[in-house]
Image (cartoon, rainbow, N blue to C red):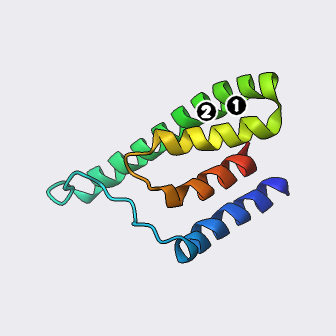
């Protein structure tokens, strides 16, 4: 039940925050139109799954656990959210920071 509530809150924030804090949609820097649709879908799925696993292992598995032991749960969650935002700084703006921190708190 807590996981379901967390997912509902994260999805709601993802839908609501752009209305409160305008932000541009993410863009892919490579033109994928010359490739077959199956190749594009496979590429995007493998990138999404691989990146998600790597980020969770690095940020939640390593960083958050170490920070929790040193400083407690609240600072660990806030620093992990900030770290996730900083890891994506080239593609996001300051308007994305609240979403990343709230998502980090809920998922952490």
Question: Is 51 drawn above or below residue 39 in the view shown?
Answer: above
Q: In this rendering, would 35 be left or right of 9?
A: left
Instruction: Write the residue at 45% across / 44% down.
Output: 88
Q: Residue furthest bottom?
A: 19
Q: Residues within 10 Å of mark 1 (few under 14, many from 20)?
A: many
Q: Residues within 10 Å of mark 2 (few under 14, many from 20)?
A: many
Between the C-alphas of marks 1 and 2, the distance is: 6 Å
Marks 1 & 2, CB-CB < 8 Å contact: yes
- Report x, y in % for residue 107: 71, 47
- Report x, y in % for residue 14: 59, 66
Instruction: Write the residue at 63% across / 44% down.
Output: 81
Q: Secondary structure at mark 2?
A: helix
Q: In this rendering, would 57 be left or right of 72?
A: left
Q: Secondary structure at mark 1?
A: helix
Question: Is 14 drawn above or below residue 101 in the view shown?
Answer: below
Q: Residue furthest left?
A: 34
- Report x, y in % for residue 13: 64, 67
The quadrant of the picture occupied by the C terminus is: top right
Query: Disc 2 marks which residue?
Result: 59
Q: Residue furthest right?
A: 1
**Image quarter for residue 59?**
top right
- Report x, y in % for residue 44: 37, 50
Q: In this rendering, would 67 be left or right of 37?
A: right
Dot 1 or dot 2: first in sequence order is: 2
Question: Is 13 drawn above or below residue 58 in the view shown?
Answer: below
Q: Residue 5 versus residue 25: which sits nearer the camera?
A: 25
The quadrant of the picture occupied by the N terminus is: bottom right
Instruction: Write the residue at 41% across / 42% down.
Output: 46
Q: In this rendering, would 108 be left or right of 38?
A: right
Query: Disc 1 marks which residue?
Result: 64
Instruction: Write the residue at 73% across / 27% down.
Output: 67
Question: Is 99 drawn above or below residue 12 in the view shown?
Answer: above
């Amino acid at each position: 039940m807590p996981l379901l509530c967390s997912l509902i809150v994260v999805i709601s924030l993802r839908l609501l925050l752009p209305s409160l804090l305008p932000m541009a949609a993410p863009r892919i820097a490579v033109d994928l139109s010359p490739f077959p649709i199956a190749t594009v879908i496979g590429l995007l799925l493998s990138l999404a799954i691989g990146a998600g696993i790597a980020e969770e292992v690095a940020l939640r598995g390593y960083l958050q656990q170490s920070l929790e032991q040193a400083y407690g749960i609240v600072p660990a969650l806030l620093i992990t959210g900030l770290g996730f935002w900083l890891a994506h700084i080239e593609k996001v703006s300051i308007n994305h920071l609240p979403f990343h921190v709230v998502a980090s708190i809920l998922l952490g």
